[in-house]
Image (tube, rainbow, N blue to C red):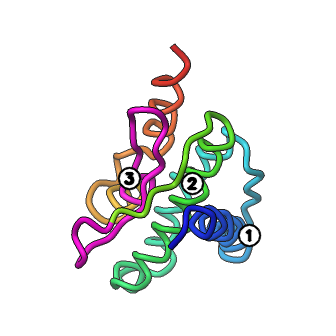
Amino acid sequence: MTPSELKTLMSECANDAVEAAKQEFNIELDHSAESVTLVDDILLSFVDKYHDQVLENEAVFTICNIFGAYIGEICRETLGGEWLYDQSNPDAPYVLLVIGANSYAFAGICYERLVNDSQVSVKSYFDNALSNHRQ
């Protein structure tokens, strides 16, 4: 996948997150930094609405990747950076947003909140990314 194709894919995934939030929960995501707070609630709302079904592999993959792309796109639009498709482990490729010397796994933080620990905040992760580059 070329960098241009990946950038397009992540933009499309971010738009899918906006559409999913609207269709599933009637929540408007407006691509603002403030809207990232809503993603924390949306992720847990999927669990409330779909219970164990949301934790099936394909559903988790989709939810985490589209909302990770949404958060990452806001970060990329704010700070710059490039998407990187890491295939170092062919069994578990993943996407990172690389900004300078730092990389951010936005889909990974969504996964943590959705599957492992509902106390993990994607908004805090996002805010930390911003503060790392605004010093």
Residue occupied by mark 3 = 109
First of labels 2, 1 by sequence position: 1
Lateral position of residue 52 relative to residue 62, left or right: left
Q: Nearer the viewer, residue 34 or 10?
A: 10
Dot 2, how many residues are within 10 Å of its Cα: few (below 14), some (14-19), or many (20+)? many
> Which one is in front in this view, the residue at disc 2 or the one at disc 3?
3
Look at the image and say whether residue 54 sits in the magenta stretch: no
Quarter of the image where one finds residue 64 = bottom left
First of labels 3, 1 by sequence position: 1
Quarter of the image where one finds residue 89 = bottom left
Q: Secondary structure at mark 2?
A: helix
* Residue 132, position as x, y percentages in the image: 45, 24
First of labels 2, 3 by sequence position: 2
* Residue 30, position as x, y percentages in the image: 77, 52
Dot 1, how many residues are within 10 Å of its Cα: few (below 14), some (14-19), or many (20+)? few
Give the extent of the magenta segment.
Answer: 87-108
